[in-house]
Amino acid sequence: MSDEEYKSFHSKLIPNIASEKIIGVRMPVMKKLAAEIKGTELAESFVSVLPHEYYDENSLHALLISYIKDAGRLVDELDRFLPFVDNWATCDVMRPKAIAKDPDAFLPYLYRLLRSEHTYEVRFGIEMLMTHFLDGRYNEKYAADIARIRSGEYYINKMIAWYFATALAKQYDSAVKFIENRGLDVWTHNKAIQKACESFRVSEDRKTYLKALRLKGLEPVSVLTGRI
């Protein structure tokens, strides 16, 4: 299933992974494979063995555990797998069906991930809050707790910016207060504005206002340190 052209292209998107650890399987092919073998003895055997050698194996693992419907087993499998996730692409491909079915039941677990010292556990927790708690389940407390996260990790800060850009599209009146009050660090603040202004879901009037709130090397008014 290796595709050398795709391998060369994708290697540039995940520069922290050595190119020799990338087989180069296109994601539609990977998803088809996961759908074909999910629930089989082969799949169970595959996910039982960690760590994997290749990036593509980790991505297949992420896809397979996304099919798990039992909440308890999903948490166990995430706890086993997340410490081995070492890049944004593998992290972001996980869309567990059990979480989608009952997000509220997983809220304590997601908050546990936000307090982790592991980059991709935090990123995954924020992404799940973004995916499942920015519509009818939105609570400004969740946004405030994410805004309090301070990290030197690029891939955590990028996800925080993505969260607030999405919040500006879906929950503008609440989310804009975090921008107006400089509740994020400067880089994340500006990145959130940038991503929001690239979105077709944010009106032009709001984009104009948000652009006026961009910061130039200023410290946030209220610096909240530490983890939740």
Image: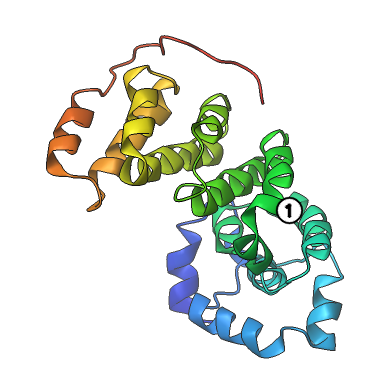
Which of the 4 image quarters holds residue 33?
bottom right
Of 176 and 64, the residue lying toward us: 176
Which of the 4 image quarters holds residue 96?
bottom right
Say what amino acid the circle numbered 1 marks. Leu
Q: Residue at x 58, y 51 (%)?
A: 128
For residue 202, side relative to residue 130 (left or right): left
For residue 99, side relative to residue 214 (left or right): right
For residue 116, side relative to residue 136 (left or right): right
Rendering coords of residue 111 (x, y %): 69, 39
Of 58 and 97, the residue lying toward us: 97
Assign a secondary structure to mark 1: helix
Rendering coords of residue 164 (x, y %): 41, 38
For residue 155, side relative to residue 109 (left or right): left
| Residue underneath mark 1 | 82
Q: Residues within 10 Å of mark 1 (few under 14, many from 20)?
A: many
Q: Residue at x 23, y 45 (%)?
A: 202
Rendering coords of residue 3 (x, y %): 50, 81
Q: Quadrant of the C terminus?
A: top right
Of 194 and 109, the residue lying toward us: 109
Q: Residue at x 31, y 45 (%)?
A: 169
Which of the 4 image quarters holds residue 176?
top left
Rendering coords of residue 222 (x, y %): 46, 10
Q: How many marks?
A: 1
Q: Quadrant of the N terminus?
A: bottom right
Looking at the picture, does residue 39 appear above or below residue 89? below
Q: Residue at x 57, y 80 (%)?
A: 31
Residue 1 visible somewhere in the drawing? no
Looking at the picture, does residue 197 appear above or below residue 88? above
Of 87 and 219, the residue lying toward us: 219
